[in-house]
Amino acid sequence: MQCPICGSGSFRVLKSRTDESRSRKIKHLVLECEECGTVFRDSIVIEKPRTHRIVVSEHGKSYRDEVELYPGEELSAGDALTVSGKLVEVTSIELKSGKRVDRATEDDIETVWAVSLEAPARVGVSVDLHGEVYSRKVEIDRDFIFRVGDVLKIGEHVFRIKSMKTGDRMIRRGSAPAHNIKRIYGVPVNMRFTHDLTDRVV
């Protein structure tokens, strides 16, 4: 908003009245320009957010909730949202046409798919015991970093990470945060371990 006479954006509100409908609020204002003293009227249209379905994944299970988005708001995979007081990350967006995409505007969105950012990550662990496989799941902080070569302990088993499987690739060198890892593959070793995950088994 700016003064119609001098173009200044500096003014004070003399009067304010709000009209409200189902989809928007309209603020009717009487303003006085602080530069030239001109009194003029203007209005602000505030669009109300619309409710959309969101499906949140947590440890392999999903639950439905609702999230509010403003008209024209753009949403992308990777965006963080607060749903019922909990933080989630958008993983994909389903359009009204049924197509899944990584980015869309509010008008086209049917369902938002997301993953909880508050629950700890759940990571599968498989240790090759020369013919038998020792398999467990552990819950750990989402940002905990696992590295290929790390020596870990679960119960009586001490093992070295040989590789790690994420959602889209196998890691044989390097590291990854726990929330990206689906499963860790290890081999037994007789070495000092860096982390004991025994209490993290679920």
Image (cartoon, helix red, strand yellow):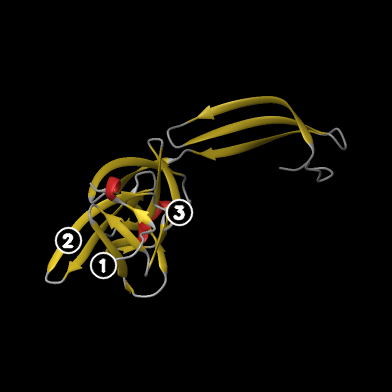
- Above or below, 93 against 11 in this view is below
Q: Is residue 81 left or right of residue 19?
A: left
Nearest the viewer among 105 and 167 is: 167
Nearest the viewer among 36 and 193 is: 193
Which numbered mark, 2 or 1, is in the foreground of this view? 2
Image location of residue 172, percent across then percent down:
34, 75
| Res. 134 mark | 2
Image location of residue 8, percent across then percent down:
81, 43
Image location of residue 78, percent across then percent down:
43, 57
- Above or below, 163 against 120 in this view is below
Measured Cα–Cα span from mark 3 to mark 1? 30 Å
| Res. 153 mark | none
Q: Which residue is mark 1?
A: 185
Q: Earlier in the sequence, mark 2 or mark 3?
A: 3
At x 37%, y 69%, the residue is: 149
Quadrant where the N terminus sits is: top right
